Amino acid sequence: MFHYQIDDRLTLRQLQMNDANALFRTVESSREELREWLPWIETTQKPADCLAFIDLCLQGARHRQSLNIGIFDRDRLIGCVNYNFIDWQNGSTSIGYWLDPAYQGKGVMIIAVQVMIDYAFYTLRLNRVEIRAATHNKKSRAIPERLRFQKEGMIRQGEWLYDHYEDLVVYGLLAREWTH
């Protein structure tokens, strides 16, 4: 099971079934801000929705298809960082993330994504990490740009977001390029 202690306050660890209420509380308290870029916010209406999500996450981890990690400030769940999928045949994964707005702009997500990149390249021995972000989502795009990912292109109308399509910028990083 994935567990990484960043410092005396911040921990990354795999989501467990008993995290469902904490996950729901964080989503609920940040709903308006998160809704702007995350299409799953509207389908997360009660703790049971988070319980079902975590169950799927655990199944994905058991089958080595994905990995969903909670970001904790002491015991408070403040966000998530994940491998949306792991493509073992091609040695690649795609990282997604979100963070309680109260913690944004403090370097938390940069560190969390760095840990996930290290894990992908050094532990899982993958060759490529990808991040996709909506073209207008400057906060989300800042992460791969600060971590020296290569901007590889755009997927036009790549994500349906409530009532419209969003273009996605695709960033890629290869194992041989990763130094920090």
Image (cartoon, helix red, strand yellow):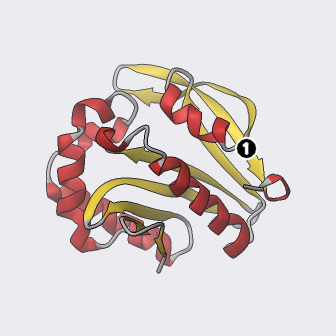
Which kind of residue does numbered mark 1 sit on? Gly
Question: Is 101 on the left or on the right of 125, as rendered?
Answer: left
Q: Residue at x 67, y 44 (%)?
A: 147
Q: Secondary structure at mark 1?
A: strand
Is 102 placed left or right of 173 in the picture?
Answer: left
Where residue 90 appears, as percent x and y from the top left, is 77, 60
Q: Residue furthest right?
A: 176
Q: Is residue 154 left or right of residue 12?
A: right
Please count the marks in the image: 1
Q: Quadrant of the C terminus?
A: bottom right
Residue 80 spot, x, y in % from top left: 40, 54
Closer-to-camera residue (168/143): 143
Expressed as whole percent of the image width and height from the top left, the position of residue 113 reads: 56, 53
Quarter holding residue 163 = top left
On screen, residue 96 versus residue 52, left or right, reads right
Pick the residue in front: 2 or 72.
72
Q: Can you say whether 166 is above or below 3 in the image?
A: above
Give the labeled residue for mark 1: 172
Q: Is residue 115 above or below residue 63?
A: above
* Residue 153 drawn at (x, y percent): 73, 28
Using the image as rendered, state which of residue 62 and residue 140 is in the foreground.
Answer: 140
Which residue of the protein is positioned furthest toward the bottom in this rendering? 1
Instruction: Please name the residue shown 59% across and 38% down the image.
Output: 132
